């Protein structure tokens, strides 16, 4: 395992995992774990930048457990990957502070999240302003060769690359400079209303929903009667069935949207059922996930602490 290149990815714990998350990114990790030594962390400190989290600490805790269960249920193998919580590895916040000290405010003001918040004229927390530095620390601690991101998140990796290069030019070659690994463009999964599937739009189909919940959600998909087929239904359907199989099915049922939705319920249920079963098993026995996170913490602490010893020495605090 040690001779595989390293991949690093973080995921923010924000509620239930939906099929947009799964087809957009998560399932690709199952393939990537064969090729890379994967460090996958639950970004619970990043979750604290949302004001909602300040009033709901139990929600942050439960979402972290939910994400851990989800990754294991979709097929990540704890023997091949290192799964851990960001908050359990102190090096992340320590390195972020050191990066703060070599980073200027105008540079951070170019970050998309800051610009978006500023445009909405919000009271911006220091955490929101500074999160690119925590993210740079998250990434650079593990010397990854690649960081998988969607096209719209490429800036995160650019911030980490810039910061690593700046640190190296000041203190010598301490950090490997990672490349973004742009995930496959199947990422845009339409939601039940035809917009991009997103928790903020409330249009999601949860991966681990019961069959009844799945049926209810699929039946609520908005259909447009102007075309020959219900496009929102079809776009979701082709994630789990080949177009060669779907074209005749949709032609036979032109205008019969109820029958097409029922076919989608069947196919989604069949596709998601094994993952749902595994998820329920993990939920019923929390010690399984706990054990994986304990192992992950141990491994991530060992790797990150070795890196921090070099960093502390380089900057003169050790």
Image (cartoon, rainbow, N blue to C red):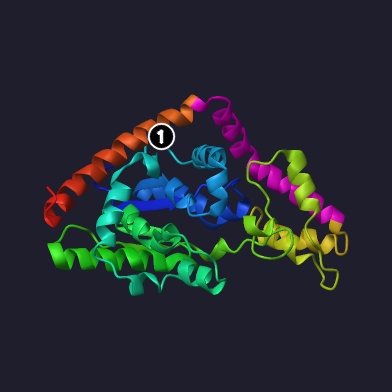
Name the one closer to the observer, 129 or 203: 129
Q: Quadrant of residue 246?
A: bottom right
Where is residue 287 drawn, in percent x and y? 48, 25
Furthest residue toward right: 256
Name the one closer to the observer, 87 or 172: 87
Magenta span: predominant SS is helix
> Is 279 a magenta residue?
yes
Where is residue 318 drawn, in percent x and y? 12, 47
Where is residue 205 drawn, in percent x and y? 68, 50
Left or right: residue 243 compared with residue 50: right
Q: Quadrant of residue 194?
A: bottom right
Specify whether residue 74 is in view: no
Against 19, residue 296 (above or below) is above
Left or right: residue 218 compared with residue 6: right
Residue picked out by circle 1? 293
At 41% from the left and 46% from the top, the residue drawn is: 41
């Amino acid at each position: 395992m040690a001779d595989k290149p390293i991949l690093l990815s973080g995921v923010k714990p924000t509620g239930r995992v939906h099929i947009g998350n799964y087809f957009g990114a998560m399932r690709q990790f199952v393939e990537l774990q064969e090729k890379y030594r994967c460090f996958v962390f639950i970004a619970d400190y990043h979750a604290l930048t949302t004001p909602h989290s300040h009033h709901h600490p139990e929600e942050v805790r439960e979402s972290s457990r939910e994400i851990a269960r989800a990754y294991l249920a979709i097929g990540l193998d704890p023997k091949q990957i290192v799964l851990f919580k960001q908050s359990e590895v102190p090096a992340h916040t320590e390195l972020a502070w050191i990066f703060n000290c070599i980073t200027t405010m105008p540079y951070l003001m170019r970050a998309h999240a800051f610009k978006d918040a500023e445009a909405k004229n919000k009271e911006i927390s220091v955490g929101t302003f500074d999160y690119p530095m925590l993210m740079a620390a998250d990434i650079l601690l593990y010397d990854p060769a690649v960081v998988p991101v969607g096209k719209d998140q490429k800036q995160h990796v650019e911030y980490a690359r810039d910061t690593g290069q700046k640190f190296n030019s000041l203190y010598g070659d301490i950090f490997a400079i990672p490349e973004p690994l742009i995930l496959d463009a199947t990422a845009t999964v339409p939601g039940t209303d035809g917009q991009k599937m997103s928790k903020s739009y409330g249009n999601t189909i949860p991966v681990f929903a019961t069959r009844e919940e799945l049926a209810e959600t699929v039946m609520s998909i908005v259909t447009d009667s102007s075309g020959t087929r219900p496009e929102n239904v079809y776009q979701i359907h082709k994630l789990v069935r080949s177009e060669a199989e779907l074209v005749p099915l949709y032609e036979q049922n032109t205008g019969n949207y109820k029958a097409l939705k029922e076919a989608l319920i069947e196919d989604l249920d069949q596709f998601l059922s094994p993952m749902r079963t595994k998820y329920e098993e993990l939920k019923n026995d929390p010690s399984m996930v706990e054990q994986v996170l304990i192992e992950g913490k141990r491994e991530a602490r060992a790797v990150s602490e070795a890196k921090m010893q070099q960093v502390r020495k380089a900057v003169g605090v050790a």
